[in-house]
Amino acid sequence: MHQMTLAEIARGLADKKFSSEELTKVLLARIAQLDPQLNSFISLTEDLALQQAKAADARRANGESGALLGAPIAHKDLFCTQGIRTSCGSKMLDNFKAPYDATVVAKLAAAGAVTLGKTNMDEFAMGSANESSYYGAVKNPWNLEHVPGGSSGGSAAAVAARLLPAATATDTGGSIRQPAAFTNLTGLKPTYGRVSRWGMIAYASSLDQGGPLARTAEDCAILLQGMAGFDANDSTSIDEPVPDYSASLNTSLQGLRIGVPKEYFSAGLDPRIAELIHNSVKALEKLGAVIKEISLPNMQHAIPAYYVIAPAEASSNLSRFDGVRFGYRCEDPKNLEDLYKRSRGEGFGTEVQRRIMVGAYALSAGYYDAYYLKAQKIRRLVKNDFMAAFNEVDIILGPTTPNPAWKLGAKNSDPVAAYLEDVYTITANLAGLPGLSMPAGFVDGLPVGVQLLAPYFQEGRLLNVAHQYQLNTDWHTRTPQGF
């Protein structure tokens, strides 16, 4: 059962080959057996899962149907879940139980999805390796000595190890697509505003976006269908009709114009990954796509701009964690200032403190124009590059990451080296575009991803291209040894 995709589970439940309760018990037992080596979960919700599974079986018995009805999933531990710990991977929120459900959680629960638990993540979603979590690093099931990517590493590792078929995740600068690439999954960052951020604990509000992580594009289409839609509670949610993502999966790629930016193939890219990307281009060409070289001239400025904007927004968002209302509070504060200082100093980890300091500096008097304002101007240039490119092509293709997953601890002493691994993913967040990573092969036994980018609200096109590619390749079917 654990090898089934979401689509296969939906068909099995519809054909009464097994019940949601049976499937849930199998997966909970598998998590208990295998997760100690991965550390992919922060909290398990066995009682809730069995309750939801029984309810889903009853709904099916009453004639209801739906691709997510009775399907087991997990939520990244920054989606608020009522009455359940929502820690954001931080000591600061280790004791926080959300008083309400995030919109994404509520929508998926209404669709009948079964929540198995909350997955591990980089603290407050700040990281590319899932090593900054208060609950310890997550291991990559393809090689337990390597990182699974971040910040959605727990969701990625759990799905890759076949502990469950799919999970929710979030992407601020690549945190869905990079772990997908490192663990041989398909991961989709939707257009900014397509999925509600209400109840999703914020890192950088103008960049954060929730999305699905699964083994196939078909499964991502099913999960995104349940997540997407307008939400009046979220002022950045866009009131745009949600198409049937599964309906367009089998559209022909004949005549599809694919742009390959020349800037992607610079000295920083592992040549073995470059070769795999060229192989995926050839595979899509065989399916009828037309390939064209394009240019994104301002890409080189994206990382410095991102690492000003994101920390600036983080320093503002995380100011609410002060030890007064909720979350961690230091012992025996001498006065209010001492309460603030020690609660934040003890509650936040090193990486979070680093980004708060950078952000506060960038927003301070005398430096705002020099850093933050300039970064926002670069952001507009990056967006303009994409708009010009999409006048010539339908989608853009390139590597998801410059290198395969690195060893645990290898970049801990050099945070900038880890930041540079986001070079291909952060531009989509700066511009608010949808992006998808899909499996494209292996280097030294570690998975590699190819990234697809599309114009706003064209998630269906990305899923269509990925699905057609997966019908003609088998990378996504490979399973890590021992899982």
Image (cartoon, rainbow, N blue to C red):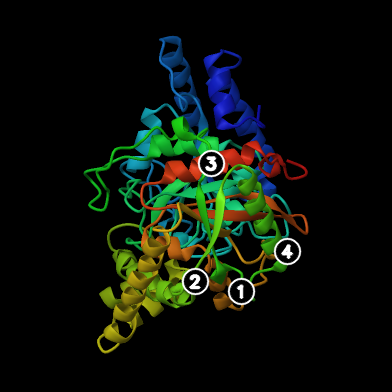
* N-term mark: 1 or 4: 1
**Disc 4 or disc 2, which is closer to the eye?**
4
Q: Secondary structure at mark 3?
A: loop
Q: Secondary structure at mark 1?
A: loop
Which of these two is toward me, 24 or 467? 467
Residue 12 vs 476, above or below: the answer is: above
Q: Which mark is residue 266?
A: 1
* Residue 140 percent across, percent down from the top left: 67, 54
Q: Are marks 1 and 4 in contact (CB under 8 Å)?
A: no
Q: Are marks 3 and 4 in contact (CB under 8 Å)?
A: no
**Disc 3 or disc 4, which is closer to the eye?**
3
**Disc 2 or disc 3, which is closer to the eye?**
3
Furthest residue to the bottom? 366
Q: Residue at label 2?
A: 351
Q: Residue at label 4?
A: 272
Q: Are marks 1 and 2 in contact (CB under 8 Å)?
A: no
Picture quarter with the C terminus: top right
